[in-house]
């Protein structure tokens, strides 16, 4: 019986090729792929890295039972996207590992930090891809540090971690 490969699985395979390329090992950029498997490079400033660290610390404070890595690759139907910070329960991590690397299953929460190199159209697209891959929520942190919480619609606060602050 023939098997079908999903778009996310094709992007997962392409990501493995990119990750194995020695010419791409030391790039000083965030690397993602688009829906055609083409490499997309995004430089970010130190403010962006500091925001990631602050979010990671707040996640650890408000949900210490989970994992909160930065720069986490997720194979989606629209390419491999790398969330700035994620939060996942240990049970979710076990399921995610079963789907390969990068995972085709998103963590419970994907966080993106806005910067000069992206806009709300890109955030809307990433949000839809993360949710389609199984994320329960997507948070977008503005350049001013405001945290906007999204599931199917924008929410006043996180449903997964309701005590998480609205500003970092």
Image: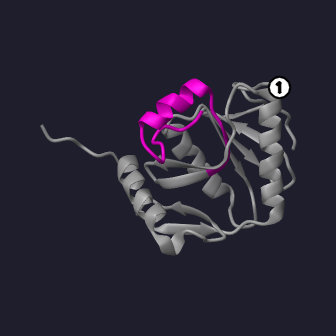
Magenta includes 97? yes
**Residue at (55%, 42%) from the top-left corner?**
130
Residue 76, horizontal then vertical, whole percent: 47, 48
In this figure, which residue is indicated by the disc labeled 1? 163
Furthest toward the front, the residue is: 22
Residue 146, horizontal then vertical, whole percent: 84, 45
Q: Nearer the viewer, residue 64 or 159?
A: 64
**Residue at (59%, 69%) from the top-left corner?**
41
Residue 147 in view of the camera? no
Please provide the residue range marked out in magenta.
Answer: 83-107
Helix, strand or loop at label 1? It is loop
- Its colouring scheme is one colour
- Please identify the quadrant where the C terminus is shown: top right
**Residue at (55%, 53%) from the top-left corner?**
81
Residue 158, horizontal then vertical, whole percent: 74, 29
Furthest toward the bottom, the residue is: 23
- Please identify the quadrant where the N terminus is shown: top left
Q: Is residue 2 left or right of residue 130?
A: left
**Residue at (49%, 61%) from the top-left corner?**
33
Q: Quadrant of residue 143?
A: bottom right
């Amino acid at each position: 019986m023939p098997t079908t490969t999903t778009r996310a699985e094709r992007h997962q395979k392409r990501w493995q090729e990119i990750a194995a390329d020695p010419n791409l090992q030391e790039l000083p950029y965030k690397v993602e792929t688009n829906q055609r498997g083409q490499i997309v490079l995004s430089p970010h400033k130190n403010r962006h890295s500091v925001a990631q660290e602050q979010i990671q610390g707040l996640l650890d404070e408000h949900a210490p039972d989970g994992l909160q890595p930065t720069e986490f690759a997720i194979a989606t139907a629209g390419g491999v996207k790398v969330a700035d910070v994620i939060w996942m329960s240990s049970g979710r991590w076990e399921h995610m590992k079963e789907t390969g690397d990068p995972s085709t299953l998103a963590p419970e929460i994907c966080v993106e930090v806005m910067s000069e190199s992206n806009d709300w159209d890109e955030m809307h697209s990433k949000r839809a891809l993360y949710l389609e891959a199984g994320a329960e929520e997507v948070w977008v942190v503005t350049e001013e540090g405001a945290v906007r919480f999204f599931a199917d619609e924008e929410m006043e606060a996180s449903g997964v971690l309701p005590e998480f602050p609205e500003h970092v």
